[in-house]
Image (cartoon, helix red, strand yellow):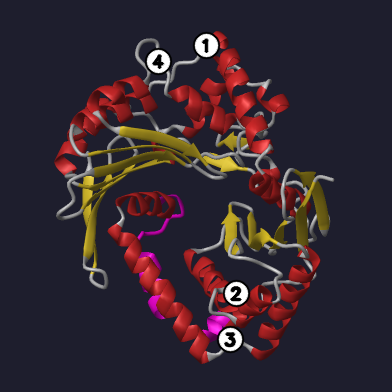
Amino acid sequence: MNKIKEVVSERLGEKYYEISHESGLKMFVYPKENYSSSYVIFGTRYGSIDTQFKLGTDSEYTAVPEGIAHFLEHKLFESEELDAFARYAKTGANANAYTSFDRTCYLFSCSENLKANLEILMDFVTHPYFTEQTVQKEQGIIGQEIKMTEDDPMWASLFLLLGAMYKNHPVQIEIAGTVESISHITADLLYRCYDVFYNMSNMAFCAVGNVDAETVLEVADRLLPKKPPIKIERKFFDEPDAVNTPYAEKKMAVNTPLFALGFKEKLESPEKSGRDIILMQTVLDVLCSKTSALYNEMLADGLINSSFEYEYFTGYGYAAPIFSGESENPREVEKRIKAAVVNLQREGVSAADFKRVRKKLYGRSIMSFNSADEIANNVIASAFAGESVFDGPEILGSITLDEVNRRLKDIDTERSSLSVINPEE
């Protein structure tokens, strides 16, 4: 029996419907007034870091080749007859998919034929079709994709940094794997991973825009398989507190050196809470947003340019503030950022900076509810984290200056890695 709950945010004046479907799938239907189009995501909590897992009945972990989640995403569009992209072409939908470190999502947007597009999505995601012949063909295709990303300096810079920071955690492995690792993927292995991670109890669905619960449920009731839930235990890798190496470099075809600087956090539990993430985002905005002294001083001294970025990079078993960009002197950028962190830890975030940044982050959070694709992706991410998409604005409204200053102390300047992509000679 399906259970439907209306979830309302008085603060935002927004609402959505959360459905506990009889198949075990968590479904979210988020109607938006005056929207003529629909954006739909069907996702599984299965990403590139899920290289080892076990079920409740297993005594040992099952290890699978790196890159298999991404490989499975590619293969799932195929069928014995017409592949999913060809079917979408007939309805006029714009379809895509992506695999990240911690999830795989299949999506489409459309301005008409919502029901037909829902049928395509729910059908192909729940009907895998793999053969050894098609797997071997895909190994060649994805092998070429891997080689192309290896030639992308920004992508290479990130994974050079992750390899410098992390010794054992698979977050350091490229999402698509390596040419060698995907050569070990078989049709049987794909079915094994599909049966584990594409169980409805490990998945989430979200439809946003010109949508209604009745249409979504009519299709879901017909097409979604009803199987017992599976308890998946993900491996929490034994990762040392210290970084693997404080410095790593590589030469590529770039005009200006690229850098990425990361501060590896200690983890008391596998995942950071939404509150922890927002507190660190607040810290990073105070430290080096475009209105900060650090950013403007480095810009004025020619150490960075407008490519400078920062993010709080976190997921199951990993967490690190990361700063990246172009610089002729990455070592000096590293020195300046570390000095600014130590100085801010000593003096503390000011009340004025805290209010300014919190107001900016709150405004950005509110604006995200005007975008159907942002809503859908945030709903899926929140569902997999066991939280609500409405939690962000509520947290921003309740965090305190003391909390931000305590969170600031979690950045350890002694536990950092710098990766540099230098120009070829």
Q: Which of labels 3 and 2 is toward the front?
A: 2
Q: SS of the residue at dot 3?
A: loop
- Tag 3: residue type? Val
Report the quarter where the N terminus lies: top left
Left or right, 78 with reference to 403 = left
Magenta range: 383-404
Kindly report the distance in space between the C-alpha atoms of the residues bearing marks 4 and 3. 56 Å
Left or right, 38 with reference to 379 = left
- Tag 1: residue type? Thr
Left or right, 340 with reference to 47 = right
Kindly report the distance in space between the C-alpha atoms of the residues bearing marks 3 and 2. 12 Å
Kindly report the distance in space between the C-alpha atoms of the residues bearing marks 4 and 2. 49 Å
Instruction: Classify residue 114 by image quadrant.
Output: top left
Kindly report the distance in space between the C-alpha atoms of the residues bearing marks 1 and 4. 10 Å
Residue at 53%, 79% (x, y): give it: 291
The residue where tag 2 is placed is 288
First in sequence: mark 2 vs mark 1: 1
- Tag 2: residue type? Cys
- Taking depth in this image into account, of 199 and 84 the one nearest to the observer is 84
Instruction: Classify residue 333 by image quadrant.
Output: bottom right
- Taking depth in this image into account, of 382 and 310 the one nearest to the observer is 310
Residue at 50%, 84% (x, y): give it: 354
Residue 66 in sight here: no
Q: Are marks 1 and 4 in contact (CB under 8 Å)?
A: no
The residue where tag 3 is placed is 349
